[in-house]
Image (tube, rainbow, N blue to C red):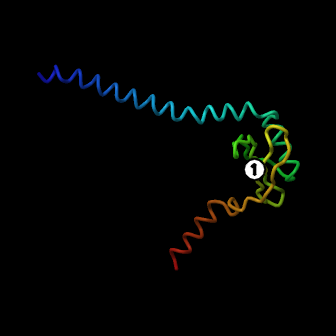
Amino acid sequence: MKRKLMFPALVIAAGVVTAAGLAYAKESGGSENEATADLAKAKISLSQAVATAESRAGGKATRAELENENGVAVFGVEVVTPDSTVMDVKVDAADGKVLSSVADTADRGGKEANEANEGDEEND
């Protein structure tokens, strides 16, 4: 009797797992479609955006990615200047113009500085 119930239970369980997998795939597929749409909006290349950002900030790029900010495709480029200032430069992916260039204070000091500060608090 248990064997007769086991097979239908396995089929139902497999169906539930498959449905959950399809739902997850559909949900996560939205970000891929957005990335594809952002890429289609880009009229300049990533390397062009990096060169523009490096020129504006006067340093070397350490990170760059295509982002969507309020429906506008922009390249976010992180540039480190010779005096070790980290700059966040936003370059319009459609026309290559610099939208903003600001010092990134969140990266100042890095992870090690935050850990050191946390250690000091524990000793107080």
Numbered disc 1: secondary structure: strand
In the foreground, 1 or 84: 1
Which x, y percent locates residue 107? 69, 59
Type of the residue with mark 1: Glu
For this view, does 96 lie left or right of residue 5? right
Name the image quarter holding residue 103: bottom right
Residue at the (80%, 45%) spot, across then down: 91
Which x, y percent locates residue 57? 85, 53
In the depicted structure, whether residue 2 falls above or below residue 74: above
Q: Residue furthest left?
A: 1
Q: Which residue is mark 1?
A: 78
Residue at the (50%, 74%) spot, across then down: 122
Residue at the (62%, 60%) spot, across then down: 111
Which x, y percent locates residue 105? 72, 62
Residue at the (34%, 29%) spot, across then down: 16
In the foreground, 101 or 40: 40
